[in-house]
Amino acid sequence: MVVVAFVRWAMLLYKLTASQAASRLALPVRTVASWLWSWRQDHLKSHALGRPAGDLTADQQELLASLLFLMGPRTGVEVLQPWFPRVPRAAIQAYVARYRARLDKGAHVRSPELEWRNCGAVWAMDYTKPPAPVDALYPQVLAVRDLGSHTALAALPVGSATAAATVALLESLFVEYGPPLVIKCDNGSNLKCDEVRRLLHAHGVVLLPSPPETPRYNGACEADIGSLKTRAHHLAASHGRHGEWTCDDVEGARLMANETSRPYGALGPTPDEQWRYRQRHPADFRVAFRKTVDYHTEGVYRQKGWLPGLPLKQADRDEMDRIAITTALLDMRILIRHRRGFTPGILRENSANITG
């Protein structure tokens, strides 16, 4: 653009030809002539300068969308680049910029097709507010869901959405089912506070918080809560208590969802059937996952330029941990990405394949 402006200015004021102006700039005459021609056509809009960014294939775009969905829309290009060793950095940068712009404008962003393979490996938790306090006593419900089997593990009415309530429910679930590898949650202080982190660390569980202002990141738990509310509404209404749930309604809705829903289609297994045939993760698998997370954590910290021992804000730590944990889940095949239109298997092989 600057070269074109100089050449046009020299031709207008000093009556130079294009070749004379190009020689003063030590540029090829043909290059300057092509820029002038493009300026007359559309002001250089169709004449890209510099190295072409290159186009991403449909599969590459889906994988990139999946990574941004999992790691957060603010993930840096340097973190994404290793997944696309033969793709120009400019192409990745351009796609990420478009992805973020659409999110900022509130436009729909195509959701990736992901599958959580290992029953019991990854849980999700969140609080929700019923239409009125349950049994006129409990204004909040804490829901916990297993992502691999779609099983609603708990829907506990509580007096208040506090860290103590979160810790108490997780402790009881760990005793009954054993701890998972990862727990996903939103950014509420009652879900990712120090008390919860200490409990998870004691049981070898990794916390995976959502990116800021991205509730869809924990969409599976949100869907579970929506299903729970629908069933609790119908149970309460059948007893003439519209909008007034009891603890029996909430628990009945959870059991009904596990017994009757078909996440893999009409011929697929129910969540109860998937969960019944799960296998607990052996100690060596848990150790391998932890080592994989630590390996990727070191790489992310190095890429971000953080040195060991330097103070780090919790939000920055969560961002880098989210990248490392997501990469480890993909590496160990706990989380896999499918091509568009793929239908996951309806057999119980997913729950049996604990090693990926």
Image: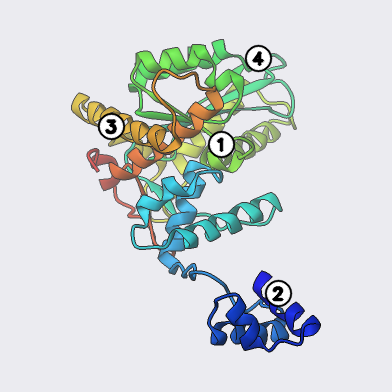
Mark 1: which secondary structure?
loop
Q: Earlier in the sequence, mark 2 or mark 4?
A: 2
Mark 2 and mark 1: Cα distance apart in space: 47 Å
The three-letter code of the residue at mark 1 reads Pro
Mark 1 and mark 4: Cα distance apart in space: 24 Å
The three-letter code of the residue at mark 4 reads Ser
Q: Earlier in the sequence, mark 3 or mark 2?
A: 2
Query: Measuring 65% from the left and 81% from the top, which residue is drawn there?
Result: 21
Q: Earlier in the sequence, mark 2 or mark 1?
A: 2
Q: Which residue is label 4 attached to?
A: 160
- Front position among marks 1 and 4: 1
- Front position among marks 2 and 4: 2
The three-letter code of the residue at mark 2 reads Phe
Nearest the viewer among 344 and 253 is: 344
Can residue 34 be seen in this snapshot? yes
- Residue 44, by quadrant, is bottom right
Circles 3 and 4, Cβ within 8 Å, touching? The answer is: no
Q: Which residue is label 3 attached to?
A: 289
Packing grade of label 4 (10 A; few <14, some 14-19, many >=20) is some
- Front position among marks 3 and 4: 3
Circles 2 and 4, Cβ within 8 Å, touching? The answer is: no
Mark 4: which secondary structure?
loop
Nearest the viewer among 106 and 162 is: 106
Q: Which residue is label 2 attached to?
A: 6
**Left or right: residue 110 compared with residue 17:** left
The three-letter code of the residue at mark 3 reads Phe
Query: Measuring 34% from the left and 16% from the top, which residue is drawn there?
Result: 203
Q: Earlier in the sequence, mark 1 or mark 3?
A: 1
**Left or right: residue 282 compared with residue 121:** left
- Front position among marks 2 and 1: 2
Q: Which residue is label 1 attached to?
A: 211
Residue 161 image offset from top left, x and y in percent = 63, 17
